[in-house]
């Protein structure tokens, strides 16, 4: 039977955020082998912030991502390997190198209002013979009609599929449904959804997207990913099977792979703590979470206050440097509010 | 002394902001603005100021090259790559405000005097103009194995040229951190933020610090440099004292035990776009500064 949608597993890219970009070749080999055996058709492997993401601002990679991509390509027998790139962080040469390593899909991500900075990168992906995926991050911040306009730009540059990406895990079921429906109605290319679990809705939103005809869905094993995590791949597969959506993946095998290959990487993954929930509630980019926790400790201010202030300032993905700015400002404000001593 | 006769090629955000700054210069005369779109707002504004404006493109300029001494290129990197050889043939000096990086990279407070006789000078990017001075200030008193900058501008202040050039922006700025800032390795990140009301241009500089640096010396050098840049870009300021972090950082320039983080903000002079567009300001203010130095050297 053919699958109702194509699944992309992003454990080895979005999951990179959850482990501060410390993934190793060994972990990549084990996870790719498991996903490939279970029948997952696309596996994404890159620094959490995409090609070139290894930096002071986002965290330095433990292992050069090109080595991780190489290991993934060598390990996969039928799955295709995808890479993420954000124009402004990675450059075209990074994409050329990844293609040279055997990556077959290029996922080009921009903030949901800035699709036009992806033109040259989507074109390059096609030129390199890769499948080009347009990835509109923080899609909750604009209305479905505005999102469609941006998606149309990506389609016009040559994207084979355009995703609505809920980077902040801020979408309700209705939000997800309306965005997928708008894209399905207005695009000729395929439509995908990438959900986060900060409001505990990642699987529900993906199922609602299926009802609206979504063609591609992202998941991460055990939910390993930014913020409170992603749509857990193994849960999605099981829920789809029970609902009657064919996935092409055996639920029992994928559950075993999740437990054996991914759960040990971060056993506590899956808990939606107050800070993770707040990301979804305030609409803050998920990968800010660990950086905000670190800044909270360094400057002695509550993580929650940092996240709320970031939401207030409408900071977008990639602006991790603003976390330091916000934490220092909160520290100054707190000091100013202290009664004078002596 | 007669003023240097300048042409602005490109009538977008950068070209138009530059127009207003040149109109105030005592040593530079803005003799023409050259665009390609007859309906361009920049060309209309030039005419309103009594400046000759044409939509006939660089061909027009080349045909009457002897009327000009200097061209400011405010188009995009690939357009400048096509135009540059023709300017040169026509004997026109070029100050390049695109990230084409054909000529030497110039940042006024760091290496203004070094390349005044070059036929083509490149001003890197707005992010480069805002951050290279800080990297250079740190590198002057400490070893900087790796420097990284994050430059965030409001979406409305980034015109189509900037957007199509985002790859060149990133690469040229990265190179400038090494070539002019004198870090051993460099990385630049550019972010567009669509928030309304638009945000001020923000820049964050991270410098890895080699062993043996002196905290006060580094901080003083940074403070002094901020003062120098703000003398020609009045809205350039530091958000807080430089932040020193001690930890193990595994940078592309090798493992280091410390870094300094500098958070900067640039408020524009609102010559064309409102004050949030400090990114235009720092670029055009630097261009004027370079051109005035060229004029003085002649």
Image (cartoon, coloured by chain):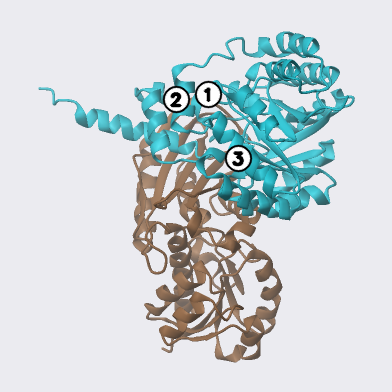
Q: Position of residue A146 (x, y in %)?
A: 56, 50
Is any atom of residue B291 visible in this view? yes
Chain letter for mark 3: A
- Measured as percent of width and height from the top left, residue A68 is found at 75, 27
Q: Which of the two marks, 2 or 3, is nearer to us in this view?
A: 3
| Residue linked to disc 2 | A278
| Circle 1 chain | A
Q: Which tint was used for chain B? A: brown
Q: Are marks 3 and 1 on the same chain?
A: yes
In this view of the protein, which residue sits in the foreground, A165 or A206?
Answer: A206
Q: Which residue is mark 3?
A: A179
Label 3 vs 1, first from the N-terminus: 3
Tell me the cyan chain: A
Q: Element at badge 3?
A: helix
Separation of disc 2 and disc 1 at Cα? 8 Å
Residues indicated by labels 2 and 3 sit on the same polypeptide chain: yes
Marks 2,1: beta carbons within 8 A? yes
Tell me where residue A15 appears, x and y as whole percent: 64, 24
Q: Residue at x 71, y 48 (%)?
A: A187
**Pointer 3 local density, CA inside 10 Å: few below 14, some 14–19, many at least 20:** many
Picture coordinates of residue B117 (x, y %)?
57, 74
């Amino acid at each position: 039977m053919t699958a109702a949608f194509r699944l992309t597993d992003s454990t080895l890219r979005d999951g990179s955020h959850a482990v501060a970009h410390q993934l190793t070749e060994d972990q990549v080999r084990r996870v790719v082998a498991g996903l490939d055996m279970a029948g997952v058709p696309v596996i994404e492997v890159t620094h959490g912030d995409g090609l070139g993401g290894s930096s002071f601002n986002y965290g330095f990679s433990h292992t050069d991502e090109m080595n991780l991509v190489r290991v993934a390509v060598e390990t996969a027998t039928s799955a295709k390997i995808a890479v993420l790139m954000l124009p402004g962080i990675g450059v075209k040469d990074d994409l050329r190198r990844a293609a040279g390593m055997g990556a077959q899909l290029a996922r080009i991500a921009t903030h949901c209002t800035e699709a036009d900075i992806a033109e040259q990168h989507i074109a390059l992906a096609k030129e390199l013979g890769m499948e080009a995926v347009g990835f509109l991050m923080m899609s909750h911040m604009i209305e479905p009609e505005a999102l469609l306009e941006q998606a149309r730009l990506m389609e016009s540059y040559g994207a084979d599929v355009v995703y609505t990406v809920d980077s902040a895990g801020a979408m309700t079921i209705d939000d997800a449904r309306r965005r997928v429906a708008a894209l399905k109605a207005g695009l000729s290319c395929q439509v995908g959804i990438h959900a986060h679990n900060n409001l505990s809705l990642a699987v529900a939103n993906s199922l609602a997207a299926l009802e609206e005809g979504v063609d591609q869905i992202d998941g991460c094993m055990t939910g390993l990913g930014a913020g409170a995590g992603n749509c857990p791949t193994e849960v999605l597969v099981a829920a789809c099977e029970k609902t009657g959506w064919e996935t092409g993946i055996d639920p029992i095998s994928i559950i075993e792979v999740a437990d054996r290959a991914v759960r040990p990487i971060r056993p506590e993954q899956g808990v939606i703590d107050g800070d993770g929930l707040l990301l979804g509630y305030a609409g803050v980019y998920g990968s800010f979470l660990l950086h905000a926790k670190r800044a909270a400790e360094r400057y002695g201010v509550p993580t929650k206050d940092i996240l709320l202030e970031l939401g207030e300032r409408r900071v977008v993905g990639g602006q991790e440097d603003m976390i330091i700015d916000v934490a220092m400002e909160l520290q100054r404000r707190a000091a100013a509010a202290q009664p004078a001593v002596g | 002394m007669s003023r240097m006769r300048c042409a602005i090629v490109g009538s977008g955000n950068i070209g138009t902001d530059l127009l207003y700054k040149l109109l105030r210069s005592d040593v530079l005369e803005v003799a023409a603005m050259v665009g390609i779109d007859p309906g361009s707002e920049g060309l209309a504004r030039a005419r309103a100021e009594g400046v000759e404006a044409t939509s006939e493109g660089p061909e027009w300029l080349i045909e009457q090259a002897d009327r000009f001494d200097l061209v400011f290129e405010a188009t995009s990197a690939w357009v400048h790559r096509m135009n540059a050889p023709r300017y040169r043939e026509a004997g026109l000096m070029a100050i390049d405000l695109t990230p084409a990086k054909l000529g030497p990279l110039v940042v006024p407070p760091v290496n203004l005097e070094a390349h005044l006789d070059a036929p083509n000078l490149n001003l890197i990017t707005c992010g480069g103009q805002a951050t290279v001075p800080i990297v250079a200030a740190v590198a002057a008193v400490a070893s900087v194995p790796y420097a990284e900058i994050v430059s965030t501008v409001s979406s409305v202040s980034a015109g189509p040229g900037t957007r199509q050039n985002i790859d060149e922006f990133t690469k040229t700025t990265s190179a400038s951190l090494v070539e002019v800032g004198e870090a051993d390795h460099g990385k630049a990140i550019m972010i567009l933020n669509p928030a309304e009301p638009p945000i001020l241009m923000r820049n964050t500089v991270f410098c890895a610090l080699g062993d043996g640096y002196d905290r006060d010396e580094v901080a003083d050098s940074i403070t002094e440099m901020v003062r120098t840049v703000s003398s020609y870009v009045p809205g350039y300021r530091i958000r807080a004292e430089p932040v020193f972090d001690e930890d193990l950082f595994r940078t592309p320039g090798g493992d280091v035990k410390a870094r300094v983080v500098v958070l900067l903000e640039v408020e524009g002079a609102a010559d064309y776009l409102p004050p949030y567009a400090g990114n235009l300001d720092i670029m055009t203010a630097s261009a004027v500064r370079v051109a005035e130095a060229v004029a003085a050297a002649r």
